Image (cartoon, grey):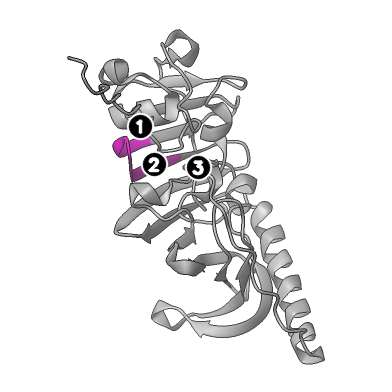
Amino acid sequence: MLGAAVIAAAVGIPVAILVSRGGASSVVTPPVASPTPNPSQRAAAAQASALYAQALTAAEKSAGFRYTSTSSGSGATLTVTGVSGQDDGSQVFNQTTSFGDEKFTLLLAPDQTVYFQGNAAAAEDQLGVSASAASEVAGQWVSVQIGDGPYKNLEVGITVGSQLSESPLDATSTESVSASGGTQLTRILGTVPATATAPAGTAHLDISPATHLPTSYAVSYGDGAGTETETFTAWGTAPSVTAPSAAVAWPTLTTSEPPDGYGSGQTPTPAPTPTPAAGTST
């Protein structure tokens, strides 16, 4: 699924959109307990869960794949396109936050260095660069190493295993569906649990009956928090990630972690202007 920080609803993007990268937290009402399933429902859920596990196992063994993910809600949209490999990959983001329209690219090299290139808004949010210096960083490649402040936020969701972990599903049943062109697919239906940043929702994963590899994933979060869809293609295709010939090391930049964390999408709230006391002059 997605590789950017959760952005609070105050920004106009549902809290469910960017689940993978942490960010602003919200209070989630615990889901209402479902009625006790009958034996046939339990059998269907067990079969669906086994098929879901089989699909993940097949996917995790793949040399790589390509994907496109779209999240929307409250009039805002986030798109991510990428290619995942076992130890490397790349992602391209286009999202709107309180910093502005963020556009940036991430490369994860085989040596686990993350390379970032983005516009000024993304440099502020993702790297912690000050607003005054962001325009100078915009367009440059910046290398981020393990242990650097924003590293954990940037590297998540890029590799095969990390990307697949962002497609959770508590499988409950299966059905046969027809894809475009008449191809028959197996749909695994289920739910996604509530988290600190998103309410519970319903989801499904479509897989190929022949290979058990996923073709698409979709989730609709409760309380109108938003929707996400992701398509998977080019299974077995390993990425070819080449490190930029020149990059600025993140520690050499003047940065400070945003109040809500790297990639939170939240600009600092200005302090209120004091109101002069009665009888005083300004």
Q: Earlier in the sequence, mark 2 or mark 3?
A: 3
Most distant residue in the top direction:
252
Most distant residue in the left direction:
281
Binning the other alpha carbons within 10 Å of mark 2 as few (below 14), some (14 to 19) or many (20 upward) gives: some
Q: Amino acid at mark 3?
A: Ala
Residue that numbered label 2 is attached to: 92
Q: Earlier in the sequence, mark 2 or mark 1?
A: 2
**Quadrant in the rendering for residue 140:** top left
Residue sitting at x 43%, y 23%: 128
Q: Are marks 2 and 1 in contact (CB under 8 Å)?
A: no
Residue 103 is a magenta residue: yes
* Relative vertical location of residue 99 with respect to residue 9 in this rendering, above or below: above
* Relative vertical location of residue 65 with respect to residue 111 in this rendering, above or below: below
Residue that numbered label 3 is attached to: 24
Q: Is residue 119 visible?
A: no
User: Alpha-carbon distance for marks 2 and 3?
Assistant: 22 Å
Would you say the magenta stretch is mainly helix, strand or loop?
Answer: strand
Quadrant into which the C terminus falls: top left
Most distant residue in the right direction:
39
Binning the other alpha carbons within 10 Å of mark 3 as few (below 14), some (14 to 19) or many (20 upward) gives: many
User: Alpha-carbon distance for marks 3 and 1?
Assistant: 17 Å
The residue mark sitting in front, 3 or 1, is 3
Q: Amino acid at mark 1?
A: Ala
- Residue 194 is situated, as x and y percent measured from the top left of the image, at 61, 61
Residue that numbered label 1 is attached to: 122
Q: Earlier in the sequence, mark 3 or mark 1?
A: 3
Query: Residues in magenta?
Result: 91-104
Q: SS at mark 3?
A: loop
Residue 7 is a magenta residue: no
Q: SS at mark 2?
A: strand
